[in-house]
Image (cartoon, rainbow, N blue to C red):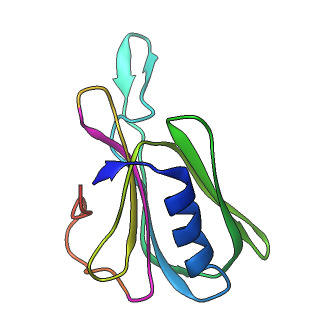
Amino acid sequence: MQPIEIAAVQRALDEFAQQDVYLHLETTNGAYAALRNEAPMAVCAYIRNGRIRYERGRITGSGPYRVGLKLADGWVYAEGLTDWELDAQGRLLLAGHDGEGRLAVALQLSRHPFPVGGLGEAKR
């Protein structure tokens, strides 16, 4: 993966718009952790192979970045994105890494279903 280039990511988002695509979206356990009574609260979200069609996608910010996908009846978005790749299978892979290089958030789009295995198999 390489640091996000806004224009390149925007072009990729435009290429996936207005068609059925598969979504992978996750936050890693602890990415949005908060302290409650001095004990960490682990919070995470995960969806793999959710089939969506978005009207338009936008990348915004000055780093870390935010990507929003406008659906017919709502939105999908991810915030804290730092890196991207358009892989050999034509999948758009976006990730947010913390200062120590650990994955905090991933948003990925594909025209074909992602491989399904155990949790945490997303490309990092």
Residue pictured at 42% horizontal, 29% vertical: 33
User: Quick one: 33 or 21, which is closer to the camera?
Assistant: 21
What's the magenta region?
Answer: 101-112
Q: Quadrant of the C terminus?
A: bottom left
User: Quick one: 19 or 71, which is closer to the camera?
Assistant: 19
Q: Position of residue 21 (x, y in %)?
A: 52, 83
Residue 61: quadrant of the picture: top right
| Residue situated furthest right in the rendering | 73
Q: Is residue 65 left or right of residue 104?
A: right
Magenta stretch encompasses residue 103: yes
In this view, 86 is above or below 16 = above
Q: Position of residue 40 (x, y in %)?
A: 35, 22
In this view, 111 is above or below 37 = below
In this view, 33 is above or below 19 = above
Q: Quadrant of the N terminus?
A: bottom left
Residue pictured at 50% horizontal, 61% vertical: 8
Magenta stretch encompasses residue 85: no
Q: Is residue 102 left or right of residue 108?
A: left
User: Quick one: 77 or 31, which is closer to the camera?
Assistant: 77
Q: Predominant secondary structure in magenta?
A: strand
